[in-house]
Amino acid sequence: MVTRESTYIIGGGLEGRERLRLVTRVMASSTTELLDRVGVAHDADCLDVGCGGGDVTLELARRAHAGRVVGIDLDEAKLEIARTEAHEAGTDNIEYRCQDLLSSDLRSSEYDVVHARFVLSHLADPQAAVNGLVRVLRPGGALIVVDIEKAATLCEPPHRSFERYIELYTLAAQARGVDPDIGPRLPTILANAGCRPVRVNVVQPVGRQPMGYEGDVKLTAPVTLESIADAILALDGAKRSEVDSLVDDLYRLAADDETLISTPRMVQAWGYRAVEVT
């Protein structure tokens, strides 16, 4: 069976956690706006799937301060960091588990809100995963999924090293049987799982200046390429010398103030488990 652990192309551990800090800074405002739109009750029970270092988990815990929040991930190193940071933040309503989202330990009708960001693009069967996540929702509960359309990433003026980075990311993902452009499919996947109604929004952070928020946006490209280097090399998709050269070029593009760089287009979709009428 292909598992998320074997299909996930981005490196984990401490370096992976630092990459997620960068992503969290870039996504902070859109995440806040998304959770505001969906609504998280103060006493909600929440599940954060693929929680990584726990940044969104902490945000859910702040909102659901009278409820409980469970964060699950397959990277125990990141989870240990998340536990430490939750303790330092004085948050006592979070439990982190090293657990697969397809685990039978996830019980039906247990949560009011389920969140999964940048998870489905690393799964061989995202529809089956979403079907399972809907089952752990209580009737009326909300499932929130966020994921990328990697091909819809901007670099202006165009640069061959940036184009090659997108090619290599796509190659590594497709070689493991996953879809790096899944974003536009999210509403259909939720609808096929029985969610009603389904809502959708698109965000795409962009940066030109090599500092502050825009600088963080631009840095996502070289940092991500560094994180997927092992997956690329395992495929013989590129030589180490080429990957290193591409990383250097992407850092140079991030450091100038003439190149406009975006993240991939990101689709936010959310839907609700039907309330059963008796």
Image (tube, rainbow, N blue to C red):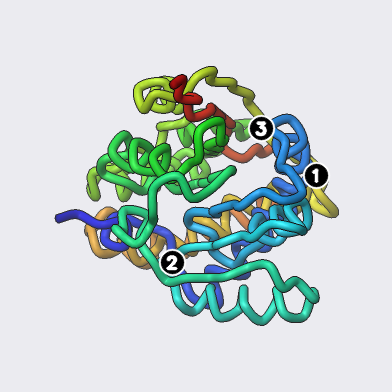
Kind of residue at badge 1: Asp
Kind of residue at badge 3: Gln
State which quadrant residue 55 falls in.
bottom right
Q: Is residue 224 above or below residue 76?
A: above
Dot 2: within a 10 Å radius of its alpha carbon, few (fewer than 14), some, or many (20 or more) residues? some
Q: Which residue is mark 3?
A: 204
Q: Residue at x 72, y 80 (%)?
A: 87
Q: Is residue 61 above or below residue 160?
A: below
The answer to whether 257 appears left or right of 108 in the picture is: right
Q: Residue at x 70, y 74 (%)?
A: 86
Instruction: Pick the residue in front: 34 or 5.
Output: 34
Q: Point out the frontmost of discs 2 and 1.
A: 2
Question: Is residue 276 something one can see in this rendering?
Answer: yes
Is tag 1's residue or tag 3's residue first in the polypeptide sequence? 3
Where residue 111 sits: x, y (%)?
53, 48
Q: Residue at x 45, y 44 (%)?
A: 109
Q: Which residue is mark 1?
A: 257
**Residues marked 2 and 3 touching at CB (< 8 Å):** no
Per the model, the C-alpha gap separating discs 2 and 3 is 23 Å
Q: Which residue is mark 2?
A: 11
